[in-house]
Image (tube, rainbow, N blue to C red):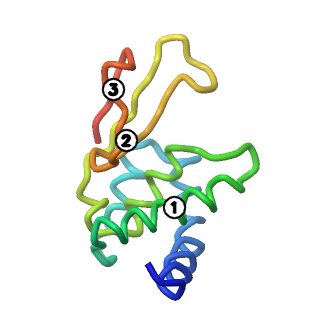
């Protein structure tokens, strides 16, 4: 992807982040995903290479948040910014012990998608 395209993606990401963070912190997953899917359906549907570039942009920004990156934030950002991602099932894997690092969020289309069997419970939205 060209630098101009990455800058456009970055701009769209920075605009969407307040909505993403609101949903992540104050709404349940079903509501947050639904709200951000509505936004994402109005977005461009990217080719696989463009979508990978978007994921890298999201990951770079996400890593700079206080406390580090968050997989659920990355999922919400991607569905808000790509029409194809807005149609993807969202998976939330949970481990019984709870606490930090006991869960993971991912989209079905992620090339390195986690296996659901790694978790005691998986919720699909």
When the figure is inspected, residue 117 is found, relative to residue 61, above or below; the finding is above
Q: Residues within 10 Å of mark 1 (few under 14, many from 20)?
A: some
Quadrant of the rendering where the N terminus is positioned: bottom left
Dots 1 and 3: beta carbons under 8 Å? Answer: no
Instruction: Tell us which disc is closer to us: 2 or 3.
Output: 2
Instruction: Tell us which disc is closer to us: 1 or 3.
Output: 1
Report the residue at 54% width, 11% height from top. Answer: 97
Report the residue at 45% width, 42% height from top. Answer: 28
Q: Horizontal placement of 103 versus 36: left or right? A: right
The residue nearer to you, when weighing 125 against 108, is: 108
Report the residue at 34% width, 48% height from top. Answer: 110
Secondary structure of the residue carrying numbered label 3:
strand
Label drawn at residue 122: 3
When the figure is inspected, residue 58 is found, relative to residue 23, above or below; the finding is below
The residue nearer to you, when weighing 9 against 39, is: 9
CA gap, disc 1 and disc 2 = 14 Å
When the figure is inspected, residue 107 is found, relative to residue 115, above or below; the finding is below
Residue bearing mark 1: 56
x, y percent for residue 31: 38, 50
Q: Horizontal placement of 112 versus 61: left or right? A: left
Label drawn at residue 112: 2
Quadrant of the rendering where the C terminus is positioned: top left
Secondary structure of the residue carrying numbered label 1:
helix
x, y percent for residue 75: 44, 51
Q: How many marks?
A: 3
Label drawn at residue 36: none
Outermost residue toward the right? 66
């Amino acid at each position: 992807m060209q630098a101009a395209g990455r800058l456009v993606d970055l701009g769209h990401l920075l605009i969407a982040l307040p909505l993403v963070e609101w949903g992540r912190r104050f709404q349940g997953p079903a509501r947050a995903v639904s709200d951000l899917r509505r936004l994402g359906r109005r977005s461009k549907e990217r080719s696989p290479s463009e979508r990978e570039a978007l994921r890298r942009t999201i990951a770079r920004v996400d890593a700079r948040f206080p406390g580090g990156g968050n997989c659920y934030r990355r999922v919400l950002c991607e569905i808000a910014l790509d029409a194809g991602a807005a149609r993807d099932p969202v998976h939330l894997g949970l481990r019984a012990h709870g606490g930090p690092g006991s869960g993971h969020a991912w989209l079905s289309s992620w090339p390195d998608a986690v296996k659901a069997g790694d978790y005691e419970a998986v919720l699909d939205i």
